[in-house]
């Protein structure tokens, strides 16, 4: 082989590698560009309410708050989530949590997951005066925070971590414990 021939082959290989690299790069920035999965609270309902209210010493409100969570995967790749973590706060104190097991959501897939949270509001979850004030005003405000860390594998090669969070404020009427208002916001971080 002449030097010239070797030179041609080497340039050919470099050129092919460069084109392949550029194609993969363009694909991962366009059609396969990672998009955040969506974690949305569709509805929230309260069941199994059991109350024992005799102020000023004894207040207990037990109930199950069921959140219907919709997860959608906008990517052209499967999304493997590690968990779906749901936390409920009353007056900034954690009053319940639920962690759903890991699973895979197919490309462009959607699923609705019910999350039943067993909650108890009592003198350990807030200042008793604050609870009484809420009961008298007939409104109990709860915050929910959900988080879904996971990842997708682009073109079977690159792993991209995606973390989706969602946050809702729920207003429950007292004593009916009906969800009167639900305001949610979505958030993401890479
Ligand atoms: C609320 O739940 C706790 C723990 O499960 C239980 O001990 C308590 O009796 C319940 N209170 C009412 C009013 O049902
Ligand atoms: C969730 O609740 C369990 C008990 O059911 C508790 O052990 C755990 O620490 C809680 N997780 C968080 C993040 O607070």
Image (cartoon, rainbow, N blue to C red):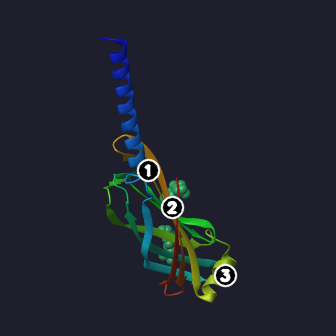
Establish if 118 lies above or below 147: below
Query: Taking 59 as reference, is 43 left or right?
Result: left
Residue 153: mark in rendering = none
Mark 1 nearby-residue class (10 Å; few <14, some 14–19, many ≥20): few
Which residue in the protein does label 1 denote?
Answer: 29
Q: Quadrant of residue 67?
A: bottom left
Q: Is mark 2 within 8 Å of ligand 2?
A: no
Q: Position of residue 77 (x, y in %)?
A: 34, 52
Q: Is mark 3 within 8 Å of ligand 1?
A: no
Q: Quadrant of residue 11?
A: top left
Q: Earlier in the sequence, mark 3 or mark 2?
A: 3
Which residue in the protein does label 2 denote?
Answer: 165
Query: Taking 174 as reference, is 70 left or right?
Result: left
Tell me the element at label 2.
strand
Establish if 54 lies above or below 98: below
Mark 3 nearby-residue class (10 Å; few <14, some 14–19, many ≥20): few
Q: Earlier in the sequence, mark 2 or mark 1?
A: 1
Q: Quadrant of the N terminus?
A: top left
| Residue for point 37% across, 56% down | 75
| Residue for point 53% across, 82% down | 172
In this view, the residue in front, 5 or 180, is 5
Establish if 157 lies above or below 126: above
Mark 2 nearby-residue class (10 Å; few <14, some 14–19, many ≥20): many
């Amino acid at each position: 082989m002449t030097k010239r021939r070797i030179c041609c082959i080497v340039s050919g290989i470099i050129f092919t590698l460069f084109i392949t690299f550029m194609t993969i790069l363009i694909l991962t920035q366009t059609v396969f560009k990672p998009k955040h999965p969506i974690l949305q609270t569709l509805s929230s309902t309260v069941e199994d309410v059991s109350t024992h209210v005799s102020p000023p010493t004894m207040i207990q409100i037990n109930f199950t708050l069921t959140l219907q969570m919709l997860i959608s995967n906008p990517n052209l790749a499967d999304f493997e989530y590690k968990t779906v973590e749901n936390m409920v706060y009353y007056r900034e104190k954690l009053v319940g949590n639920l962690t759903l097991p890991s699973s895979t959501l197919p490309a462009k897939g959607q699923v609705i997951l019910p999350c039943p949270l067993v909650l108890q509001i009592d003198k350990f979850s807030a200042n008793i005066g604050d609870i009484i004030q809420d009961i008298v005003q007939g409104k109990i405000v709860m915050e929910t925070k959900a988080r879904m860390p996971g990842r997708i594998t682009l073109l079977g090669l690159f792993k991209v971590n995606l973390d989706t969070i969602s946050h809702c404020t729920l207003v429950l009427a007292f004593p009916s414990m009906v969800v009167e208002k639900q305001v949610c916001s979505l958030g993401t971080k890479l």
